[in-house]
Amino acid sequence: MKMFGRTVLAVSVLGVSLFSAINNCALANDKVLRVYNWSDYIAPNTVKQFEDETGITVVYDVFDSNETLEARLLAGKSGYDIVVPSNSFLAKQIKAGVYQPLDKSKMPNWKNLNPVLLKNAAASDPDNGYAFPYMWGSIGIGYNPEKVKQVLGKDAPINSWDLLFKPENAEKLKSCGISFLDSPTEMLPLALHYLGYPVNSQNPQQIAEAEALFMKIRPSVAYFHSSKYISDLANGNLCVAVGYSGDIYQAKARAVEAGDKVNVSYSIPKEGAGSFYDMVAIPRDAGNVEGAYKFMNFLMRPDVMAEITNSVGYSNANSAATPLVDESIRNDPGLYPQQEVMATLYAIPDMPIATQRLMTRGWTRVKLGK
Ligand code: SPD
């Protein structure tokens, strides 16, 4: 746990920290805002700036998978005023009554949001009634070009999922380290797509084949985790990680900063990759709704949003922020893909609960290797 100013950053991906639990009782509702966001998904100064401008203390906890967030939300009183689910989980959570409808009159900065992205996000949230898009990205391959070349030669298929799904490649890459995201609802659709099945297949046979594809390469995988790969790619402990676009950007930035000659690149394989929007919403039982609106409106400010993108490398959904985003990020084809690459991306599907359970069981078997 790290403290700066009045901000409490509880950097535990396991859930609510003891510190925030104590604070839940100790601080008056309208003076404290409890935020539950993805790890590595905000600029170092954002929370402090909000606190300084509003006098509200932020308790900031992080998670690294939708599955973790959903478990917390569905368990009942989450204790949070702001949460950040992905679009693929939003629709069924809205239906389950997890969120409160937004009063847009309390967010004058709504006008800064990108209308095209708002329209896309409306597929899981009609009229954008419950959430606004924060950041978006893709799930591709982060890799260390030198190490991959060393192991697979100069023709290593880094632009294809063959790099990992062909067991002969995975077996060789094992020597320098492979990691996968720990998320059944993101990883199994990827295998379905590779096998030529619909990414939103609910067919148990097809899902079993996707599981079997992972099972074949399971012995070559070092670990399944959805945030640890950032530092491991940066320090050369992994040579390939299936990960989120901005996280790979952060790994690359950290490697450059460390100056120890580790290179990190990002590839969106030619077969296509999953894309996501992460959405900001207010849980139905939030204790500080007015504070939540202030935070949302703050996040919609172009200067605030551009600083976040410049720090974490994810593309944001704020048109007015675009001119303030570093050119190196705007021109990075992994973060802002060209039209023809965009056309290969598929939306990570919204799965019915029963299929989600089936996938979770299959994924547990993959992780256990049996
Ligand atoms: N470190 C931030 C990662 C954010 C990724 N959100 C992805 C959701 C994919 N469904």
Image (tube, grey):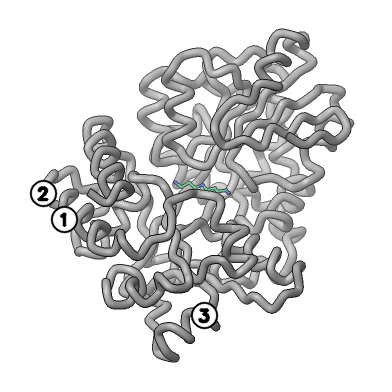
Q: Residue at coordinates 39% horizontally, 41% vertically from top-left? A: 88
Give the left or right position of residue 190, taking residue 276 as reference: left
Q: CA distance from mark 1 to mark 3?
A: 30 Å
**Nearest the eye: 165 or 276:** 165
Q: Residue at coordinates 36% horizontally, 57% vertically from top-left? A: 346
**Nearest the eye: 200 or 66:** 66
Is residue 288 positioned above or below 307 on the image?
above
Q: Residue at coordinates 22% horizontally, 31% vertically from top-left? A: 354
Q: CA distance from mark 1 to mark 2?
A: 6 Å
Residue wearing tag 3: 147
| Amino acid at the residue labelled 1 | Glu
| SS at badge 2 | helix
Q: CA distance from mark 2 to mark 3?
A: 36 Å
Give the left or right position of residue 245, taking residue 197 as reference: right
| SS at badge 3 | helix
Residue wearing tag 1: 209
| Amino acid at the residue labelled 2 | Gln
Is residue 190 positioned above or below 269 on the image?
above
Q: Are marks 1 and 2 in contact (CB under 8 Å)?
A: yes
Residue wearing tag 2: 205
Q: Are marks 1 and 3 in contact (CB under 8 Å)?
A: no
Residue 64 pos. (x, y %): 53, 42
